[in-house]
Image: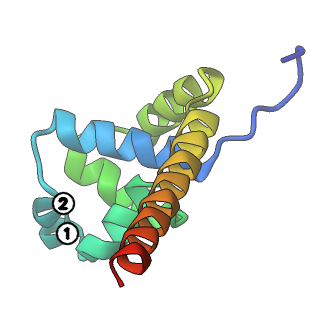
Amino acid sequence: MNAGEKLKISRTSVGLAVRAARQAARLSLLDISKKTGISISALSRIETGLRSLDFIEASMLAHELNVDLEHFKDLAVTYEKNGISEKIGKHRELMTDLRRAEQLALLVAIEAAA
């Protein structure tokens, strides 16, 4: 990255930062959900990068986790610089391929038994 170039931070990296802060605080998704009013499903989707985090939600989470918003940003930047977003994307692709292969093997076994 060149000087003056801005780093784009992915939802995955932001979600990982939220999860790391939550786990460091030794709180469950249920604990945080009760404190913030954000559903467990939404929190899970935020932490896995499947849902964006708006400013109000980020502020509530930071308050309940006893960190400042800069902490989330710094963690997310660290994850992004280390390519974690791409690695998780590749992992998800591999898991999808594995499930498809398992389904295909099951279909072949069923057809062979018929």
Q: Which residue is mark 1?
A: 33
In this rendering, would 36 be left or right of 62?
Answer: left
**Foreground of the two, 71 or 9:** 9
* In the depicted structure, whether residue 42 falls above or below residue 101: below
Please give the count of numbered marks on the rendered protein: 2
Q: Quadrant of residue 22?
A: top left
Q: Quadrant of residue 111?
A: bottom left
In this view of the protein, which residue sits in the foreground, 5 or 48? Answer: 48
Identify whether 86 is placed above or below 107: above
* Horizontal and vertical percent position of residue 3: 88, 14
Q: Indicate the secondary structure of the residue bearing disc 2.
A: helix
> Disc 2 vs disc 1: Cβ atoms closer than 8 Å?
yes
Mark 2: amino acid = Leu
For this orientation, the residue located farthest to the top is 3
Q: Which mark's residue is nearer the viewer, 2 or 1?
A: 2
**Crowd rating for badge 2 (residues with CA inside 10 Å; few <14, some 14–19, many 20+):** some
Q: Is residue 49 among what the camera can see?
A: no
Secondary structure under the numbered disc 1 in the rendered image: helix
User: Does residue 19 lie above or below 32 as drawn?
Assistant: above
Question: Image height check: is 111 above or below 11?
Answer: below
Disc sitting over residue 58 in the figure? none
Query: In the image, residue 64 lies at what x, y percent?
Result: 21, 53
| Residue 56 or residue 102, whichever sits in front | 102
Q: Quadrant of the C terminus?
A: bottom left
Image coordinates for residue 37, horizontal then vertical, percent:
24, 76
24 relative to 94 in the view: left or right: left
Q: Which residue is mark 2?
A: 29
Q: Residue at x 10, y 61 (%)?
A: 31
Q: Amino acid at mark 1?
A: Ser
